[in-house]
Image: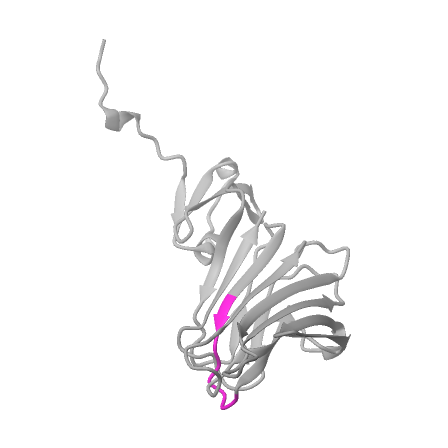
Amino acid sequence: MTAHSQASLVHVPYSWSYADAAARIAATGFVTTDVGKLARQLDDNSLWMLTDDSPVTWTPINTGRTLIQSQTPTGTGTGSFTSIPATDKKIIIEYVARGTAVATSVSMDIELNADTTDANYRRQFLNAHTSTTVAGGGADDNVVDDAVIASTGPANEASYGIIEIPFYALTTFYKQILSRYAHRRDTSSVQQQLDVRIIDWENTAAVNRVDLILASGNFDTGSTINLYGEQ
């Protein structure tokens, strides 16, 4: 009986490896016999199965949430995610942000698929600070965070937020954007602020691009925006 070393029994389960989602999506040269093989995405250690070679289609093997892209948009007032793959059930954006505008705070808009027409967005919000609760809404409004802390706001503070777009890749209904954020409002006794928002985007198209845009100034050093996909 011939003995085998442990090394000879180790098999790598994937056929390709890519640095990130952009590199995986840009990959070409696949043939029919490659369908069903796996690729490893190194930035989040996720596994993807090639389910079609023409057009190239990837299906995530990992369940739960995977990182699609991370940005640190210092020196610009816009954080953009483009060519978002339609392979997940929901996309989630998490951010920590501070602005450079000479103001206590600035608002931040969201645009889907580069749609800059205000009339295509409708918003409702619920805002709370100290014992005060304020609600409001209206048409022509895509403000997802109305108080990103800026340069004259409390020192070392930032706004933290989560934006979700469920069923972003479906093409039957208009899209709903679900948002919530929190920050220290100012240096007075008001202090903490919590805000919950919903925004209706009147378009049935699959979401393939998201832009977060400050009303003035740029994102300050340390601001980070992460885009995740969730099954």
Number of marks in the rendered image? 0
Q: Is residue 6 left or right of residue 22?
A: left
Q: Main secondary structure of the magenta part?
A: loop
Residue 214 on the magenta span = no
Task: State the residue in front, 122 or 195.
Answer: 195
Q: Position of residue 105 (x, y in %)?
A: 54, 83
Q: Image quarter for residue 198?
A: bottom right
Q: Is residue 48 above or below residue 101?
A: above
Q: Position of residue 22 (x, y in %)?
A: 47, 58
Q: Residue at x 31, y 29 (%)?
A: 10
Task: State the residue in front, 203 or 15.
Answer: 203
Q: Image quarter for residue 164?
A: bottom right
Quadrant holding the N terminus:
top left
Q: Is residue 142 left or right of residue 184?
A: right
Task: State the residue in front, 72 or 192.
Answer: 192
Q: Is residue 9 above or below residue 68?
A: above
How is the protein colored in the picture?
one colour
Q: Residue at x 47, y 78 (%)?
A: 219
Q: Position of residue 91 (x, y in %)?
A: 59, 57
Q: Image quarter for residue 138?
A: bottom right
Residue 41 seen: yes
Query: Residue farthest to the bottom?
Result: 102
Q: Residue at x 54, y 80 (%)?
A: 189
Q: Is residue 140 left or right of residue 33?
A: right
Range covered by the magenta-colored residues: 95-103
Q: Is residue 152 above or below residue 34?
A: below
Q: Position of residue 12 (x, y in %)?
A: 36, 35
Task: State the residue in front, 20 or 63.
Answer: 63
Residue 25 seen: no
Query: Residue farthest to the top?
Result: 1
